[in-house]
Amino acid sequence: MALKPSFSTEISNLLYAAHGSPINSCIQCGTCSGTCPVANYMDQSPRRLIGMINADLKDDVIDCNTYWFCASCYHCTVRCPADIDIAGVMYAVKRYSIWHKTYGEDLVGPQFSEAFVKTIVRSGRSYEPLLAPSYMTHFGPKEFFQEVVTASKMMLKGRIPVLPPRIKRLDNFKNMIRKIIPLGESS
Amino acid sequence: MKKFAYFPGCSLEKMASSYHKSALETTEVFDIKLQELDDWNCCGATTYFHVDQLLAYTLVARNLALAEKEGLDLVAPCSACYKNAYFTNEYVKEDPDLAEHINFALEEDDLQFNGNIEVHHLIDVFVNDVGVGKLKEQVKNPLKGLKIAPYYGCQIVRPRKNGEDVEDPQYFEDIISAMGAEPANFPERLRCCGGSLIMTSRVAALDMVRILLQSAENNGAHVIATACPLCQVNLECYQATVNEEFGTDFKMPILYFTQLLGLALGISPKKLGIGIELVSATPIFSKLLPKEVK
């Protein structure tokens, strides 16, 4: 019988270009947590998250907001004395949670990312007004109002496009994507 | 004349149109032509990588292939676009298996990418292709009296690309000095603005913006210069929200480095897209001594 890979091995395997920086070389020094500008808002610090992955605490890892709060600033990555691409690890856990649909329901990150990718697949370019529902539906009345005010000011200055942009060779573009992932075209 | 394939990226189409305008105006002064890639697609920022890595690299590689077809190196003014293009280019060069997978998909658009180009951020063009010395020679209106905070942000500097100094870079300061302005001491210059967290983790991002604005203000900066549309929008367009949330009273103008450089080169504010800010940039003009740039 084939052995089932551990959670830490699964995550390591999701790291393309990890370039010899396996997660298990972590020495738990905490440089990442000390560097991270978002650590104060995370359920678990980056150091703890890596420790939890290495301890195969899969459910606890997936349940916390840490990896979806990573802004991809790579400050931890460039400072890690064990040469772990920590921001890359965060990406790997994000992908894992998107594929398995296991992220917390109150998280905006995964829904925003999916909306973004769908927008690109449809038109080839990003268009802010189509992305807004993916995060604004999570806002309370105050945040919603603030966001509407900000967007209106930007619109008045001509900084938000009226029509969604699209690339010319869109059919080729979609065929190109179909060679990599299914586009869910029953809809 | 030096020519580059120019990848503006989605933000520069509208939200950051002033960066687009000022990039073209300022490069022209140095006889550099930014030729926009025909039919480029979105680089995916961070989000493609949340869904599928091969998809992410392929979509970025399409733009690289378009540039390679023109026989030109690629220039991106947005730090996120730059980071994606830079690393996709590097990975394709060193990983034939990845290249094969990507090219299998690119066939659908009659393209292929062989990793025969280089990728630069717009600021690199001024630092390396123009050079700070040449830049200084062309300055007609030195921005004397203006204290500018050099905001590097994240992805220009990180991850480390080519052995460069990621802890204490100086090229942004050098460019500001060449404009005749004074680079402000800005301890948070390498700290993240929050990026897309402004949409997905708002409380965290607003605090990150506050810290940056506070650091610039504490150090007497009149304006923050950025080299990335995401940084610009977070610091500027969400400044009012930060003031509301934290009871602060920031009125810090946030301009692209190309806009400030353009002023120093004697280009009119209008041509540089000045005037579409949510935080007015006019106070900086009164700081300019002895000759006002009009």
Image: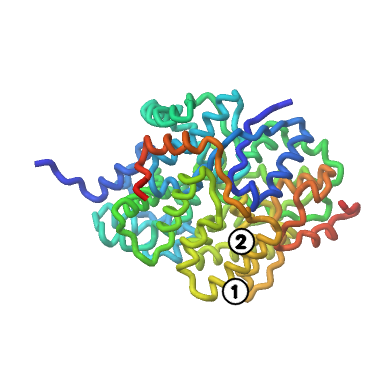
Q: Amino acid at mark 1?
A: Phe
From the viewer's side, name the closer residue of A78 and A142.
A142
Its colouring scheme is rainbow
**Residue A42 location (% of width, % of height):** 41, 64
Q: Is residue B119 left or right of residue B276?
A: left
In front: label 2 or label 1: 1
Give the residue pinned by disc 2.
Answer: B212
Give the SS element for disc 2.
Answer: helix
Q: Which label belongs to residue B62?
A: none
Q: Residues within 10 Å of mark 1 (few under 14, many from 20)?
A: few
Task: Name the residue rendered at 44%, 36% in the picture.
Answer: B58
**Residue B267 location (% of width, % of height):** 82, 44
**Residue A74 location (% of width, % of height):** 48, 49
Q: Amino acid at mark 2?
A: Leu
| Spatial separation of the CA atoms under disc 2 and disc 1 | 13 Å
**Residue A161 location (% of width, % of height):** 63, 53
Classify the position of the N terminus of chain B by image quarter: top right
Q: Kindly tell me whether residue A10 is visible in this rendering.
A: yes
- The residue most toward the right is B291
Give the SS element for disc 1.
Answer: helix
Task: Name the residue rendered at 79%, 55% in the picture.
Answer: B146
Q: Which label belongs to residue B246?
A: 1
From the viewer's side, name the closer residue of B98 and B222.
B98
